[in-house]
Image (cartoon, rainbow, N blue to C red):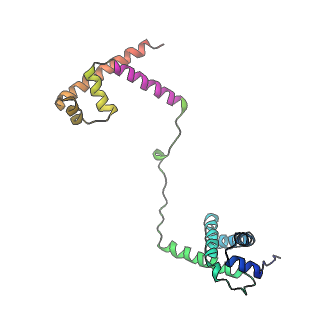
Amino acid sequence: MTETVRAAPWCVSALRERDAEAFAGVYRAHAPGLFRYLVKQLRDRSTAEDLTSETFVRALRGSLTLRESTADIRPWLVRIARNVLVDHWRAARTRQEIATVVPESDRYVLPDPATTLIEESERRRVLACLDRLNKEQRECLRLRFLHERSVAETAKVMARQPGAVRALQYRALRRLAELMADDQEEAP
């Protein structure tokens, strides 16, 4: 048999004055029962936890309305919990929830350390070979690929025609590939 927790007159007056310790005592005494009531109604523990919290937020706001003659505050709290539940159900009728599944490609996966090391080594190798190109080829590839400029933007920066930039890019990429192949053969 559960014991009914009655609100002593000092407790009601403490709640009306928003005494933190009195409110904490009421919370400890009544939160488990209100939570069970909400879980039974909702069959969802997470939402019941949220609504239990909302019940006590509303109780704190409404504590000024408590009468000094209140002997048992449990019915008052249950009424607040019921109103919170009804508000939740009303909002659910108009709320549109769309369940989304995050595509595998959008999930963040920590990179494999070995892969990261290989990629970093490869990046350093490309940059070293890029430095061995002549000045114009190096500038063209850096603008196009490192700074992600378009052919037109690169042509403007280099004071060339777009066709000349495409030809320069083609020759620079071929030369870079040769340097990378030579570098690969020299590697132990």
In the picture, residue 179 is in which quadrant? Answer: top left
Q: Could you tell me which residue is drawn at 61 percent across and 70 percent down?
A: 54
Question: Residue 53: x percent and y percent?
Answer: 63, 68
In the rendered image, the vertical position of residue 155 relative to residue 76, given as above or below: above
Question: Residue 78: x percent and y percent?
Answer: 67, 78
Closer to the camera, 71 or 86? 71
Queried whether the magenta region covers residue 122, the answer comes back as: yes
Find the magenta span and give its range: 114-131
Q: Could you tell me which residue is drawn at 25 percent across and 36 percent down?
A: 150
Q: Horizontal placement of 84 versus 180: left or right?
A: right
Question: Residue 101: x percent and y percent?
Answer: 49, 54
In the picture, residue 133 is in which quadrant? Answer: top left
Q: Could you tell me which residue is drawn at 43 percent across and 23 percent down?
A: 124
Q: Horizontal placement of 119 versus 68: left or right?
A: left
Q: Can residue 56 be spotted in the picture?
A: yes
Queried whether the magenta region covers residue 47, the answer comes back as: no
| Residue found at the far front of this picture | 17
Give the prevailing secondary structure in the magenta stretch: helix
Looking at the rendered image, the quarter that the N terminus falls into is bottom right
| Residue found at the far bottom of this picture | 69
In the rendered image, the vertical position of residue 63 relative to residue 184, given as above or below: below
Question: Residue 103: x percent and y percent?
Answer: 47, 49
Q: Can residue 7 be spotted in the picture?
A: no
Q: Could you tell me which residue is drawn at 69 percent across and 69 percent down?
A: 20
In the picture, residue 31 is in which quadrant? Answer: bottom right
